[in-house]
Image: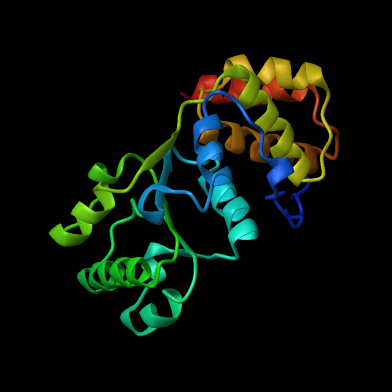
Amino acid sequence: MNDTQLPLPLPMRPAMGRDDFFVAPSNAMALAFVDIWPNWPSNRLAVVGQESAGKSHLAAVWARVSGARVMRACDVNAADVPDLASGPLAIEDMHVPMGAETERALFHLHNLIAAEGHSLMVTGRGAPSSWPITLPDLASRLQAITMAEVAAPDDQLLSALLIKHFSDRQVTVSPAVIAYVIPRIERSFAAVEAIAQQLDAAALAGQKPITRSLARTLLDTDDAEA
């Protein structure tokens, strides 16, 4: 008989306020651009970076001060363009492939927001020139937007983000656990998010706290399976 307990999924509410954003050299420029709104060049800003870099957090911070709505690019449709262009707007996940109709809607939305004098933020992985946009007019407009990059994180930021991910899950871990984990995972935002989820799930399944020993067991297992 297997005594392993199935973990119960607890609601996770990521803290997305301005004070919850950890400032580091890798993201300071992007945050500075958010803070100088509404003085953006051409009233537009592209926030780019790798997966889980904090782009959505920055969009949420900006939305709170500007009153902007936030939505995914793939959810934009032509019928909603006039309403969406009536105020500041953040459009996320521009790197995700979308259909021709969505691209046309985004093109008209971009132009109408500009004509109305409202601010536009777009987010995505990689530079706008790498996004899979097939409509030339839309691609050229996106590539002309001022870009603020969230660069690869340093150890200090990775540690702060790991603590935040545990805090979002209402879990407290010791500094020793953080210090053990950070040098042993991939240096990426996504890896930090993944290890927090894995350690939380393992602790729930075993009905025990997250310790250095648990982290060692989990990371050793991952190394063995690699």
The image quadrant that residue 200 belongs to is: top right
The image quadrant that residue 35 belongs to is: top right
Determine the residue positioned at 46% across, 40% down. Answer: 51
Residue 152 x %, y %: 47, 26
Left or right, residue 62 beside residue 178? left
Determine the residue positioned at 63% across, 31% down. Answer: 23
Left or right, residue 123 beside residue 180? left
Q: How many marks?
A: 0
Q: Is residue 129 above or below residue 88?
A: above
Front residue (pair 113, 135): 113
Residue 87 x %, y %: 49, 71
Residue 216 x %, y %: 69, 19
Residue 158 x %, y %: 61, 26
- Quadrant where the N terminus is found in the figure: top right
Q: Is residue 188 above or below residue 18?
A: above
Front residue (pair 57, 41): 41
Determine the residue positioned at 56% across, 22% down. Answer: 185
Residue situated furthest bottom in the rendering: 79
Q: Is residue 39 above or below residue 148?
A: below
Q: Is residue 159 above or below residue 15?
A: above
Front residue (pair 186, 211): 186
Left or right, residue 31 beside residue 64? left
Residue situated furthest left in the rendering: 136
Residue 142 in view here: yes
Residue 201 in view here: no
The image quadrant that residue 210 belongs to is: top right
Q: How is the image coloured?
A: rainbow
Determine the residue positioned at 65% across, 59% down. Answer: 64
Left or right, residue 132 beside residue 49? left
